[in-house]
């Protein structure tokens, strides 16, 4: 019996660490608010997809000033819709967290009632067990009443077992609710960060458009001249980096590389792979070495990017309108680095430790890029080398990211 009571005390202690919830609003009204926000979110997502479709079509057109301006305008529109989506989702998550708080409060009450019921049953059982079966028989007016009294003792013990099972279920339920609530709060923090950073990205896009118009004086010839100069500079830098990395790849040591599963993909959900690692069709015509040193994933500007593994930020740079544009480098081990390039915004700083799945920045179209995407690179060795007209560029022994997912 004492062992049984000890198990009950463990359950009581587990229930004692509950956090009281805030004053709840009507549950029905709360559910209506969540459903309303869900529908509003669905419509905004539809508009985002529609706008992204226009951007995808523009990406297939030849480079021109009018195309660049139109792409920038639709990018701003898409980002503003994403900002709206974040605002709706923040509101929806707030209602969901409140609903979970209400559930926690209700379950707390049930646990309290169940604990009181169990305590009462234990007292009754202890009292009857102290009397003993023989004493119950002797005290009984007749055999029937004695049997009834013993039967009641067994019923009390059965009720106690049922209450303990129910209490265990309530405790498991409340633990699950607490975890779900914590997950929702994590989502809320991420969405709040997305909202803040997307507002900055919109302003950056507006600044870029004004700069473009100022530099070209809204003339196609001036834009094409500027484009030609950038492409020439890019070819020079790319040729030098490509030749260096081609030599370094011959020194690749497979025994120093981690196994499969070390990396997760640096984004949530599914994204199209627009260019693989290696001697791709595009690389054969676009690069002197004919080799692509990473993997490209197509995604809208402002898509949150995630650390592919635990590590430390060793570089947060910007090559301007050539090479990688805005980029981040994470060091994971002494022989393993990851590169995230063509970003619209970085949200980490050098020296910062990050965990797998943590938001580190947002996808973009900076540097030498023909459309919004993420260039994801994996390196065994790396150094940050300076190039005229590009600043500091990551260079090293590249590996195929697909080998480490």
Image (cartoon, rainbow, N blue to C red):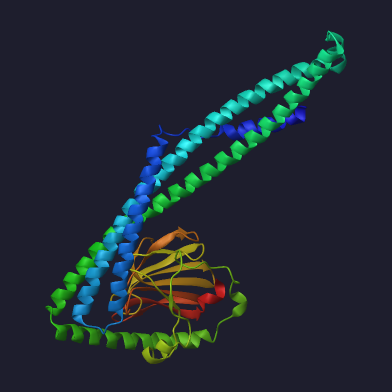
> Which sits in the foreground, 170 or 5?
170
Q: Is residue 197 visible?
A: no
What residue is drawn where x is 49% and y is 33%? 105
Rendered location of residue 88, percent (x, y) = 33, 51
> Which sits in the foreground, 307 or 87?
87
- Placement of 148 over or under 331, stated as above or below: above
**Left or right: where 11 falls relative to 190:** right
The quadrant the N terminus occupies is top right
Rendered location of residue 376, percent (x, y) = 44, 74
Q: In the rendered picture of this protein, how many numbered marks are placed on residues?
A: 0
What residue is drawn where x is 66% and y is 30%? 163
- Placement of 297 over or under 345, stated as above or below: below
What residue is drawn where x is 25% and y is 63%? 202
> Which sits in the foreground, 256 or 35?
35
**Left or right: where 11 falls relative to 68:** right
Location of residue 61 (image quadrant): bottom left
Rendered location of residue 381, percent (x, y) = 50, 76
The quadrant the C terminus occupies is bottom right
Q: Is residue 231 visible?
A: yes
**Left or right: where 28 falls relative to 255:** left
Rendered location of residue 335, percent (x, y) = 54, 73
Location of residue 194 (image quadrant): bottom left
């Amino acid at each position: 019996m004492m062992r049984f009571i000890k198990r009950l005390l463990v359950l009581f202690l587990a229930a004692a660490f509950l956090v009281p919830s805030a004053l709840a609003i009507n549950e029905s009204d709360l559910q209506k608010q969540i459903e309303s926000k869900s529908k509003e979110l669905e419509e905004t997502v539809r508009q985002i997809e529609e706008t992204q479709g226009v951007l995808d079509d523009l990406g297939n057109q030849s480079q021109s000033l009018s195309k660049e301006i139109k792409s920038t305008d639709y990018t701003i529109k898409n980002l503003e819709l994403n900002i709206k989506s974040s605002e709706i989702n923040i509101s929806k998550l707030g209602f969901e967290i409140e609903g979970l708080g209400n559930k926690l409060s209700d379950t707390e009450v049930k646990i309290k009632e169940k604990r009181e019921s169990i305590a009462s049953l234990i007292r009754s059982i202890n009292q009857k067990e102290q009397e003993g079966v023989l004493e119950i028989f002797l005290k009984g007016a007749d055999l029937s009443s004695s049997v009834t009294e013993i039967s009641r003792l067994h019923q009390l013990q059965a009720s106690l077992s049922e209450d303990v099972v129910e209490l265990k279920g309530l405790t498991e339920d409340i633990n699950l609710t607490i975890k779900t609530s914590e997950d929702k709060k994590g989502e809320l923090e991420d969405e709040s960060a997305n909202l803040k950073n997307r507002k900055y990205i919109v302003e950056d896009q507006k600044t870029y458009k004004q700069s473009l118009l100022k530099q070209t004086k809204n003339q196609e010839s001036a834009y094409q001249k500027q484009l030609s100069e950038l492409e020439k500079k890019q070819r020079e830098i790319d040729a030098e980096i490509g030749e260096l990395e081609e030599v370094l790849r011959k020194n690749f040591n497979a025994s120093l590389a981690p196994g499969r599963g070390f990396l997760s993909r640096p984004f949530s959900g599914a994204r199209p792979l627009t260019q693989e690692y290696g001697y791709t069709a595009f690389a054969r015509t676009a690069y002197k070495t004919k080799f692509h040193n990473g993997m490209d994933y197509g995604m809208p500007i402002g898509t949150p990017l995630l650390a592919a593994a635990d590590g430390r930020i060793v570089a947060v740079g910007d090559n301007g309108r050539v090479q990688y544009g805005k980029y981040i480098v994470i060091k994971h081990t002494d022989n393993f680095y990851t590169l995230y390039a063509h970003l619209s915004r970085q949200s980490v700083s050098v020296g910062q430790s990050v965990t797998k799945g943590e938001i580190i920045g947002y996808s973009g179209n900076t540097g030498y890029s023909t459309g919004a995407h993420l260039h994801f690179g994996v390196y065994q060795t790396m150094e940050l080398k300076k190039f005229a007209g590009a600043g500091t560029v990551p260079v090293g022994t590249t590996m195929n990211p697909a080998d480490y997912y």
